[in-house]
Amino acid sequence: MQFHIETMTCGGCARGVTKAIQSVDATATVQADPPNRRVEVTTTAPRDQIVAALTEAGFAPA
């Protein structure tokens, strides 16, 4: 699944996004692209759980 995260602008943000996603699914694969503000996630977790974790961490998907 893919997300556009407007507030992800740097490597630190990418680490925060990854941490939030992996708090839901520790085995999730996360490929963050801060310059384009995109995240590609491979996970078995439901999308709504990932969105909730990102939003709680301050990285609400657009």
Image: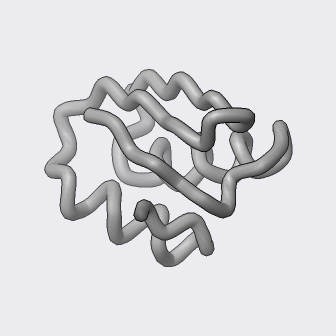
Q: Is residue 17 left or right of residue 11?
A: left
Q: Position of residue 36 (x, y in %)?
A: 63, 35
Q: Is residue 25 left or right of residue 20?
A: left
Q: Position of residue 9 (x, y in %)?
A: 77, 49
What's the residue at 26%, 34% (across, down)?
A: 1
What's the residue at 63%, 29% (across, down)?
A: 33
What's the residue at 43%, 61% (across, down)?
A: 61
Q: Quadrant of the C terminus?
A: bottom left
Q: Is residue 57 left or right of residue 23?
A: right
What's the residue at 73%, 42% (across, down)?
A: 15
Residue located farthest toward the front when viewing the structure as drawn: 36
Viewer-proximal residue among 11 and 25: 11
Viewer-proximal residue among 57 and 8: 8
Using the rendered view, name the quadrant where residue 25 is placed: top left
Instruction: Describe the colour scheme in one phrase.
Output: one colour
Image vertical order of residue 11 relative to residue 13, above or below: above
Q: Position of residue 5 (x, y in %)?
A: 53, 54
Q: Position of residue 22 (x, y in %)?
A: 48, 43
- How many dots with numbers? 0
Image vertical order of residue 51 relative to residue 52, above or below: above
